[in-house]
Image (tube, rainbow, N blue to C red):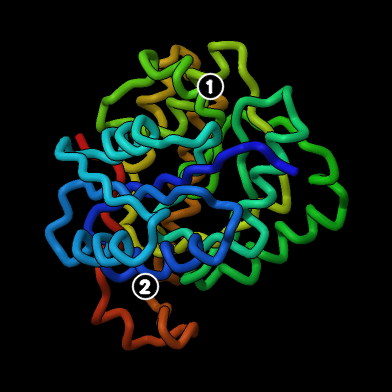
């Protein structure tokens, strides 16, 4: 039986459309001991939704962080957590059945790794089926049979030992123009710690980032370059990888523009009534 206590941190900013479903899915998993929803100055109905859940459920905690930026919200949640294991997801993450038990089991049996990345599928995307097929094929090929080591965690589906967080707490950057999850991963590596990945820690995350206009997405990927420069590991291979991702996004963007997210199909009329994509988690 696991002796670990699992806290799950969810940084949020203006997520009234997504936060209820996120919390409800977490509440279905009894292995989760504490749910901290960190309101980062939301101006919509997000705060009242969280507070209502907190009144109904003892394990749900409302945390407020006034300093704007996902890194500040994450730090506030991690610092306030009481578990020796900290899970971290986004407001548009849908944890799947068995997610929490997989996290606890991983840290119970594995002493080698300080953090773990899950297997993350897409929803709200015209490419969701293709993406799921590709991941499931890797699972069937046995690529996840062992707790393989990976270079980084993603904020949408990860967990970390509280002791590992405390060991890098003073090293992580609070710059708003970098990807905080990559920065955290690199700080762990620089501290001699490793990250594992397991297939049964499954979640879905929204693919609406694909709606972001290509020029705006360049700013999103600039945050990747900035964090790699910060840690002095940028090289031409990594730069080509980032550029390649920007090019793939530009090619996929017209398909997202045609996609009806409610009906899950392509419709020409969607070209004339679109949002500008999700709020960027990084800013200059």
From the viewer's perspective, is 91 left or right of 131? Answer: left
Q: Is residue 158 above or below residue 169?
A: below
Residue 142 in picture, x, y percent from top left: 87, 49
- Estimate the spatial distance between the alpha carbons at disc 1 and disc 2, rounded to whole Å: 41 Å
Q: Is residue 31 above or below residue 190?
A: below
User: Measuring 20% from the left and 59% from the top, which residue is drawn there?
Assistant: 47
Q: Earlier in the sequence, mark 1 or mark 2?
A: 1
Secondary structure under badge 2? helix
User: Front-most of 79 and 13?
Assistant: 79
Q: Quadrant of the C terminus?
A: top left
Q: Quadrant of the N terminus?
A: top right
| Residue 215 in sight here | no
Residue 35 in picture, x, y percent from top left: 42, 51
| Residue 138 in sight here | yes
Residue 100 in picture, x, y percent from top left: 61, 52
Q: Which mark is residue 164?
A: 1
User: Measuring 36% from the left and 30% from the top, which residue is drawn there?
Assistant: 79
User: Measuring 72% from the left and 53% from the top, which residue is drawn there?
Assistant: 200
Numbered disc in front, either 1 or 2: 1
From the viewer's perspective, is 38 left or right of 152? Answer: left
Q: Quadrant of residue 210?
A: bottom left
User: Front-most of 166 and 240?
Assistant: 166
Label 2 neighbourhood size at 10 Å, few (<14), some (14-19), many (20+)?
many
Q: Which mark is residue 262?
A: none
Secondary structure under badge 1? helix
Identify residue for label 2.
257
Q: Quadrant of residue 223?
A: top left
Q: Are marks 1 and 2 in contact (CB under 8 Å)?
A: no
Label 1 neighbourhood size at 10 Å, few (<14), some (14-19), many (20+)?
some
């Amino acid at each position: 039986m696991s002796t670990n206590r699992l806290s799950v941190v969810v940084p949020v900013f203006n997520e009234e459309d997504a936060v209820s479903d996120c919390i409800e899915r977490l509440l279905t998993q009894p292995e989760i001991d504490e749910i901290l929803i960190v309101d980062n100055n939301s101006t919509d109905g997000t705060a009242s939704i969280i507070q209502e859940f907190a009144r109904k459920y003892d394990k749900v905690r409302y945390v407020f962080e006034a300093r704007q930026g996902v890194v500040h919200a994450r730090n506030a949640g991690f610092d306030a957590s009481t578990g020796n294991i900290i899970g971290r997801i986004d407001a548009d993450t849908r944890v799947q059945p068995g997610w929490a038990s997989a996290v606890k089991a991983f840290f119970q049996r594995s002493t080698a790794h300080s953090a773990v990345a899950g297997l993350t599928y897409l929803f709200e995307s015209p490419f969701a089926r293709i993406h799921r097929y590709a991941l499931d094929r890797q699972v069937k090929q046995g690529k996840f049979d062992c707790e393989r080591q990976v270079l980084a965690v993603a904020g949408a589906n990860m967990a970390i030992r509280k002791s590992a967080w405390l060991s890098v707490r003073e090293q992580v950057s609070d710059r708003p123009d970098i990807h905080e999850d990559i920065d955290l991963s690199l700080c762990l590596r620089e501290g001699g710690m490793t990250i594992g990945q397991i297939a049964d820690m499954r979640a879905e995350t929204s693919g609406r980032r694909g709606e972001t206009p290509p020029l705006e997405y360049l700013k999103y990927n600039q945050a990747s370059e900035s964090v790699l420069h910060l840690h002095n590991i940028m090289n031409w291979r990594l730069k080509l990888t980032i550029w390649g991702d920007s090019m793939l996004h530009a090619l996929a963007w017209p398909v997202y523009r045609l996609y009806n997210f409610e009906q899950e199909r392509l419709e020409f009329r969607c070209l004339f009534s679109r949002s500008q994509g999700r709020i960027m988690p990084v800013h200059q």
